[in-house]
Amino acid sequence: MSTKELVQTKKEALQEERTSPEKYYMPLTDIMEYEDRLVLHMDMPGISKDKVRINVEDSKLNVETEFNSEKYSGLKPLYSEYNVGPFTRSFTLSTKIDQAKIEAAMKDGVLSITLPKKVELARKISVN
């Protein structure tokens, strides 16, 4: 079972990704695969965990937040690469992810979302 089977982040997911039409915040994201789970790591420096909204709907994992630049109001940046504003990103989940057991944690400016794989038990089928 490959990562591609579990989380579709290529063409399909990117076509459905929603972002604001202007300048927007786009955190770097890594997806790591382990034997029993996938883990998404998203860089979100300066964003508190209470500002992050995560939900699963129709096999889509949605992550939303906003980097607010109010604390910098009145300042004129000389140079800036850090985008601000709202952020929404969606990942299409396969049926092999146990959606009821998805967990998230924020530590040191990194959001980690754990996507456990379903345990598939072999079973015998009797012939009548």
Image (cartoon, rainbow, N blue to C red):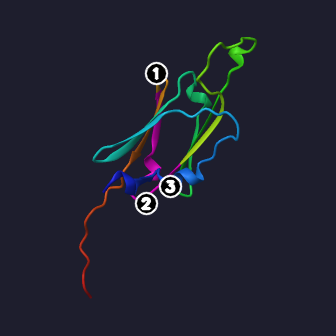
Left or right, 12 with reference to 6: right
Sequence order check, earlier mark of 2 and 3: 3
Disc number lying in front (2 or 3):
3
Near mark 2 (Cα within 10 A), the count class, few <14, some 14-19 or many ≥20, is few
Sequence order check, earlier mark of 3 and 1: 3
Residue 81 x, y percent position in the rendering? 58, 23
| Of residues 75 and 116, the one drawn nearer to the viewer in this rendering | 75
Q: Which residue is disc 1 drawn over?
A: 108
- At label 1, which amino acid type do we have? Asp
| Of residues 100 and 24, the one drawn nearer to the viewer in this rendering | 24
Q: Which residue is drawn at 25% across and 69% down?
A: 123
Sequence order check, earlier mark of 2 and 1: 2
Left or right, 43 with reference to 5: right
- At label 3, which amino acid type do we have? Lys
Check the picture and name the quadrant holding the C terminus. Answer: bottom left
Could you say whether the residue bearing mark 3 is in a helix, strand or loop? helix
- At label 2, which amino acid type do we have? Thr
Hey, which residue is sitting farthest right in the picture?
74
Residue 110 x, y percent position in the rendering? 47, 28
**What separation in Å lies between label 2 and label 3 (alpha carbons)?**
18 Å
Q: Which residue is drawn at 27% across and 47% down?
A: 35
Q: Which residue is drawn at 62% across and 16% down?
A: 79
Q: In which quarter of the image is residue 118?
A: bottom left
Q: Which residue is disc 2 drawn over?
A: 95
Q: Which residue is disc 3 drawn over?
A: 11
Q: In which quarter of the image is residue 46?
A: top right
Q: Quadrant of residue 5?
A: bottom left
What residue span does the magenta drawing correspond to? 91-106
Residue 52 x, y percent position in the rendering? 59, 33
Near mark 3 (Cα within 10 A), the count class, few <14, some 14-19 or many ≥20, is few
